[in-house]
């Protein structure tokens, strides 16, 4: 297996932090949810997966986290094949899932503390937690409130704070902006850019074409389990991503009929 | 890692309002069970003492030991008041003549049906219901609840081995729930001391073992709940499933086991035995009447000697009658007992499919109020009867009330014998099997509870290793 030619515009020679090689998943009921996915995310890069409902985005992320085993191919984090050594692989990755509720009876600080320790980071102080919560846009007065009182967007921010605290070289995000209001969405984009500039490899799935174009270094368009296009930032300059997206989707829909 | 997960489980459980409310109710019920048990003991104690006094009062003014109507009573035992078992259902009073078959009469529920209403509040029952529900209430969504709130995904995005997680989860939940339960249990024990219930070292040992069995029973439902929650995706379905399992364990299995065993094994009915016995009795009387009619004293000069000879003759007849009756009765009783034993074995082993039955049987064995109590009490009464017979025999020169009749020469009014002193009668005391023996009889059930724990633990463990954490 080798790097796929779709990686046009990849000018970095370093090994990718996140990589999928011919990654495929057929569920027990026969649905081919992911069909030979190949992608790479380098350190200091944001990769946005676009695609309609059921395109296979969550499946891909679940494979990276070894929540499910691949039917074929492999997902790698920091060079480790995730389904061979999931424990070692997961040390290298932070995850923000869609609709995370966290522990409703814990405060934001308690949730942060628990998940940081679980991620192997035991040295944080209360001040560190406070700072990161402020950084993701949670106001001071919310920090000691139980999560049950949080709105969906506030929980999402808390989930992002947890991912930041894990301080891992790779970050996976499944529709991270879905619960955020426009202002929070904007702040979130800025935050992602900061994390990229720190040198993390970020793979996110999203329905938000506008944000994807704004922030991503690479955009992959998925349809029915297949990566149908991959565009580097430079190829998107001046392009209308929305039109491109619809065009690709339409093309594949027709091809599929 | 394990410590972290346990800690989190502790904090999450104890911090919830669900815990505050249900633990409060649980604690209250447990303390109430101890209180009711203590009051129950005091009431039975008072009744027991009244019965003893009444027995003595009846003997006042009697001048002839042969006229004595001795009754013995099942003394109340503190632990039996906590785990009543069948103690309130069996007869407590036995009339002892020194000879013949003993029957216990006058059960507490029979005399005072009001108490049958309150039977449900003993420690056994509270443990059966409350501990199992408490465990289910907290563990029904142990795994699938975390999945629903997305924390399972987030947890396993970290380098967490599944085995560590499930172990921490079980240990944490058990500690979070079982340790607080010790508080009302200790308060309950304190209450027993404050209310002046006389518990000796053995009693405390029994109580400690009953509580230990209770915690094992609690563990069964806890691990079972975690298991079920690791087999289902939605917490609503695991809750429903657990409620159904609970109904089966607590209500349906024990009762249907008894019904099934009753159907499967025939036992000689009591009425049948009574009929056969009275038939033989009538026949023997008939024969005796003829023999008596033919009684001829060997000499007719000395009335005193004649009377003695007649009485001796009557005693001998009574003895023979007694022997024949006893032989029949023993044969029938043996037959009945064998049937009963077989039925009992079937019923109890079938019932033991339910951990609730196992716990209850263990508790009753430890408290000395199991099905064996009836026989043990009668055995003690029979042993007493021998001592009593020896005592009366000594007082009357070999004469016993025989169910037949005895002719006494009424002496002249001038040499009226002095009244007897009833306090000379040997006292009856009943001791339940000693602690080591009780512990040994409850071992099977405690072992069974441990096996249930192991089974559910293994189930939960394996179930979780294969669980879809997404
Ligand atoms: N556990 C499962 N068993 C069977 N099929 C599944 C399972 N999970 C997902 N699928 C199927 O796999 C395909 C891809 O699903 P996936 O959740 O990856 O899509 P997605 O791109 O994340 O969609 P969305 O934007 O709606 O989140 C869908 O057709 C879905 O029905
Ligand atoms: Mg999805």
Image (cartoon, helix red, strand yellow):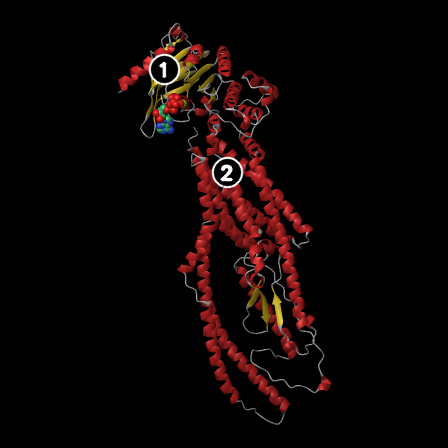
* Disc 1: host chain: A
SS class of the residue under badge 2?
helix
Of the pair B138 and B382, the residue shown nearer to us? B138
| The disc label shown at residue B139, or none | 2
Q: Does the beta carbon of the residue at mark 1 sit less than 8 Å from ligand 1?
A: no
Q: Quickly name the residue at label 1.
A: A221
Of the pair B469 and B2, the residue shown nearer to us? B469
Instruction: Please state if A16 lies on the left or on the right of B447 as rendered.
Output: left
Crowd band around label 2 with a 10 angstrom C-alpha radius: few (<14), some (14–19), many (20+): many
Residue appearing at x 69%, y 50% in the figure:
B194
Of the pair B56 and B40, the residue shown nearer to us? B40
Residue appearing at x 68%, y 72% in the figure:
B422
Residue A13, percent across and down? Answer: 41, 8
Residue B332, placed above or below residue A235: below
Of the pair A196 and B318, the residue shown nearer to us? A196
Figure quadrant, ligand 2: top left
How many marks overall?
2
Residue B317, percent across and down? Answer: 53, 82
Which is closer to the viewer, label 2 or label 1? 1
SS class of the residue under badge 1?
strand
């Amino acid at each position: 297996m080798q790097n796929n030619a779709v990686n046009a515009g990849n000018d970095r020679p370093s090994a990718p932090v996140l990589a999928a090689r011919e990654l495929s998943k057929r569920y027990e009921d026969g649905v081919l949810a992911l069909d030979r996915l190949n992608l790479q995310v380098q350190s200091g890069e944001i990769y946005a997966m676009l695609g309609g409902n059921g395109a296979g985005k969550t499946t891909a992320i679940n494979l990276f986290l070894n929540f499910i085993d691949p039917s074929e191919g492999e997902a790698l984090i920091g060079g480790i094949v995730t389904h061979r050594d999931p424990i070692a692989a997961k040390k290298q990755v932070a995850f923000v899932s869609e609709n995370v509720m966290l522990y409703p009876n814990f405060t934001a600080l308690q949730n942060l503390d628990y998940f940081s320790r679980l991620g192997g980071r035991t040295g944080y102080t209360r001040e560190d937690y406070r700072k990161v919560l402020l950084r993701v846009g949670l106001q001071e007065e919310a920090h000691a409130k139980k999560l049950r009182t949080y709105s969906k967007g506030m929980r999402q921010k808390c989930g992002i704070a947890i991912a930041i605290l894990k301080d891992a070289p790779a970050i996976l995000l499944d529709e991270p902006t879905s619960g955020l209001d426009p202002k929070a969405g904007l702040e979130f984009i800025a935050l992602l850019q900061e994390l990229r500039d720190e040198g993390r490899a970020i793979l996110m799935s999203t329905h938000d074409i506008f944000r994807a174009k704004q922030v991503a270094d690479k955009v992959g368009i998925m349809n029915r389990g297949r990566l149908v296009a991959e565009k580097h930032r430079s190829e998107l300059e001046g392009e209308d991503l929305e039109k491109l997206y619809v065009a690709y989707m339409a093309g594949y829909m027709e091809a599929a009929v | 890692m394990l410590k972290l997960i346990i800690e989190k489980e502790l904090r999450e459980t104890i911090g919830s309002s669900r815990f505050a409310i249900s633990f409060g109710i649980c604690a209250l019920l447990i303390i109430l069970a101890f209180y009711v048990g203590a009051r129950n003991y005091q009431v039975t104690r008072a009744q027991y003492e009244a019965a003893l006094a009444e027995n003595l009062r009846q003997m006042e003014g009697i001048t002839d030991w042969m006229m004595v109507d001795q009754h013995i009573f099942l003394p109340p035992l503190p632990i039996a008041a906590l785990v009543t078992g069948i103690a309130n259902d069996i007869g407590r009073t036995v009339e002892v003549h020194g000879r013949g078959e003993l029957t216990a009469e006058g059960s507490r529920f029979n005399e005072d049906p009001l108490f049958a209403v309150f039977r449900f509040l003993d420690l056994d029952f509270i443990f059966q219901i409350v501990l199992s529900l408490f465990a289910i209430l907290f563990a029904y969504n142990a795994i699938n609840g975390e999945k629903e709130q997305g924390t399972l995904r987030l947890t396993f995005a970290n380098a967490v081995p599944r085995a560590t997680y499930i172990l921490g989860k079980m240990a944490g939940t058990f500690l979070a729930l079982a340790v607080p339960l010790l508080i009302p249990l200790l308060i309950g024990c304190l209450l027993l001391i404050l209310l002046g219930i006389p518990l000796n070292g053995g009693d405390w040992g029994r109580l400690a073992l009953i509580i230990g069995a209770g915690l094992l029973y609690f563990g069964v439902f806890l691990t079972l709940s975690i298991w079920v929650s690791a087999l289902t995706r939605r917490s609503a379905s695991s809750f429903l499933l657990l409620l159904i399992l609970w109904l089966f364990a607590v209500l349906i299995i024990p009762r249907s086991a008894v019904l099934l065993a009753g159907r499967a094994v025939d036992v000689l009915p009591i009425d049948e035995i009574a009929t056969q016995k009275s038939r033989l009795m009538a026949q023997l009387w008939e024969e005796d009447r003829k023999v008596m009619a033919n009684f001829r004293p060997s000499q007719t000069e000395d009335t005193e000697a004649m009377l003695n000879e007649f009485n001796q003759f009557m005693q001998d007849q009574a003895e023979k009658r007694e022997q024949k009756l006893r032989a029949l009765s023993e044969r029938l009783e043996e037959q009945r007992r064998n049937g009963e034993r077989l039925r009992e074995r079937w019923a109890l082993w079938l019932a033991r499919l339910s951990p609730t039955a196992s716990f209850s049987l263990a508790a009753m064995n430890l408290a000395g109020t199991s099905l064996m109590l009836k026989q043990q009490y009668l055995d003690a009464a029979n042993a007493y009867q021998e001592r009593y017979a020896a005592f009366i025999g000594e007082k009357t020169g070999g004469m016993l009330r025989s169910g037949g009749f005895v002719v006494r020469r009424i002496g002249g009014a001038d040499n009226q014998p002095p009244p007897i002193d009833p306090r000379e009668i040997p006292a009856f005391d009943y001791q339940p099997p000693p602690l080591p023996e009780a512990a040994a009889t409850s071992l099977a059930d405690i072992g069974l509870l441990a096996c249930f724990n192991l089974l559910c633990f293994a189930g939960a463990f394996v179930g979780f290793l294969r669980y879809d954490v997404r």
